[in-house]
Image: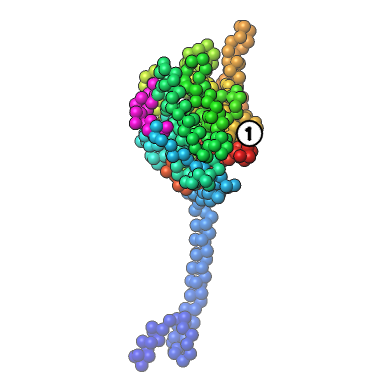
Amino acid sequence: MVVKKKSISSASPWSTEKGKSSKTNEIHYSFLKPQLRHALLLCFLLSVWLVILRCFLLPSSTSENNIEKLNVDEKAKKTSKSSAISKCEGGMSVYIYDMPAEFNKGLLKDCSHLNAYTDMCPHVANCGLGQPLSYMVETAVATTWFATHQFIAEMIFHARMENHPCRVLDPINAKLFYVPFYGGLDASSKFHDANLTARDELAVRLADYLRSKPWWERHHGKDHFLVLGRTAWDFLRRNNDFGNSLLNLPDVQNMSVLTVERNPWDQVHNQHGIPYPSYFHPYTSHEMMTWQNQMRQSSRPHLFSFIGGPRRGVEKAAVRDELIRQCSESGRCKLLKCGKGPSKCHNPIEVLKVMSQSQFCLQAPGDSFTRRSTFDSVLAGCIPVFFSPHTVYTQYEWFFPAGDAREYSVYIDENALKTGNGSKRVVSIEEELFKIEREKVERMRSTVIKLMPRLTYAHPNATDLGFQDAVDVALKALWAKRLKLNV
C-alpha cells in the first residue's frame, strides 16, 4: 500500500494510464486540470507576446547607429555578391608586365630624391598609401586611413592590380596589358635637371622595351595602358620647357594613358582622367557603407568652405584671391588658408573635418585645372563648387555621372568673380549657394555620397572588396574601349 501510494503521489498529473489512479488522485487531477489549462494558455500567450516584442518593437528602441549597422551589414552582403559576379564579365583579363625594376620599384631606392620639393620616402611606404593615420573617427579601423600623397596614384594602381581578380599570369590569355611604369616619380625626380636628354632617358627606354615584346607587336600597343600619378602637363614638354616628353612619344600615343589630369585639348584621344587618391582605402563594402552613413548624418553648420592658398600668376591669383576674400568676409564660410610651412590644410584630419561640416566646398583651379581637394570633398560628402569646366567636367568622364552636372555640383564661371570695367558686379558666392533649396541640396549630397566608392582606391590587400572602386571602374572603361576598337 505504501508503495502504491508512493507511485500515485509521484505520478504525473498529465498521466492517462487506466487502472493506476485512485479516487483521491482523480479528485486531485480534476481540481488541477482547469488551472493547468489556464497556465498553459498564459504561457503560450506570453511566448507569442515576447516573439512580437522582439521582432517588431525592440528594433525601434535601439539606437540609430545600431539600425544603420544592421542595414549596412545586409547591404554589404548583397553588394559583395553582385560585385564579385560582375567585375570580370565579358572575358576581361589583364596581364601585368614583369618589367625591369628601373621602371618602377627600383626608383623607390632613392625615395628621398623622387621629388624636387618633398621627401617622398614616407609617401611611398605601404605600396604608395603612405603613413597610417592614428585616428579618424572613433569607430574607424586605423589601417583604412592613410596620409596619402596626391601624386602617387601610379603606385596604388599597381599594388591593386597585383591582387586583382581579373589579373592573368599568362599573356596568352590576356585581353588588356598593363605597363607598371612609375612615370610620375621619374619625372618629378628630374624637374630641375637642365639636361633634357636625361629627363627623357627612362621614357625612351620604356618605349624601346615595349617594342621588343611580342604582345606589343600584336596590336602595336592599342590594348596596352599605363597609369601616371601626375598631370599630363608634366609629360608634354614643349620648347625645352618643364617636364619630359613621355606623352609625345609615338609608341606611348598608341597606348591608353590614365592620368590624374588629362589635356582637355588632347588630339590623340588616348588620355583618360582618373581620380586623385584621397585618404580612405577600405578593405570591404561594410567599411565603405559605414563611412557613407557617417557622412549622411554629419552636422554641417557651414554653408560653404574653402581650403587653399593664394597662387601666382594673374589668372590664378585673381580667382583664388577672390575666393579667400569672400570666404573670410562671410559668416557662413569656413576658411582653412594654406601657406608655406606647417599648416592645418596639410593635415588630412583637419581637412576632412572642415569639409564634413560644410554644405558646399569651393574647388578653384590650383597649379593646374584639377585639384585633389575635389576628391577629398566627395569623401566628406561635401558638394563641390567648380569655377572651371576643366576641373572635373572635361576630365573624369568614366567616374562622374554623364548628363546634368548640377545633380552633384555647382558651377560658377570664374569670369563672374573678376571685376570688369567697373560696372560689372562680382558674383556673391554666398548668395548663389544660399538660394539653392534645401531639398535640392539634400538630393545633391545624396548623389555625391553615392559617388564615393567609384572615386576611392581600395586597399591593395583587399580580397573580397564588395564594391567597384576607381581601379575597377577604369578597367571596365578600358575594356569597353578595347571592344570598341575591335583589337
Name the residue at 65% across, 32% down: 403
Secondary structure under tag 1 reads loop
Q: Count all numbered tags in the image, as a single digit.
A: 1
Q: Residue at x 36, y 93 (%)?
A: 1
- Left/right placement of residue 384 relative to residue 105 reads right
Residue sitting at x 61%, y 12%: 425
Q: Residues within 10 Å of mark 1 (few under 14, many from 20)?
A: few
Is 420 on the left or on the right of 366, as rendered?
right
Q: Is 159 placed above or below 194 here?
A: below
**Residue 406 in sight in this render:** yes
Q: Who is closer to the viewer here, 287 or 153? A: 153
| Residue occupying the point 49% across, 82% down | 30
Question: In this figure, which residue is indicated by the disc labeled 1?
Answer: 402
Q: Is residue 30 above or below residue 409?
A: below
Residues 173 and 316: in front is: 173
Give coordinates of residue 187: x percent, y percent. Answer: 44, 24
Q: Which residues are magenta?
A: 103-120
Q: Quadrant of the C terminus?
A: top right
Q: Position of residue 372 (x, y in %)?
A: 48, 27
Foreground of the two, 387 or 156: 156
User: Up-down: is 59 above or below 282?
Assistant: below
Tell me how the rendering is colored: rainbow
Q: Quadrant of residue 120?
A: top left
Q: Amino acid at mark 1?
A: Ala
Q: Name the foreground residue: 464 vs 69.
A: 464
In the rendering, at what x and y percent does residue 306 appear?
49, 23
Q: Is residue 451 visible?
A: no
Q: Is residue 165 magenta?
A: no
Residue at the right extreme, as displayed: 403
Residue 292 location in percent, x, y? 50, 39
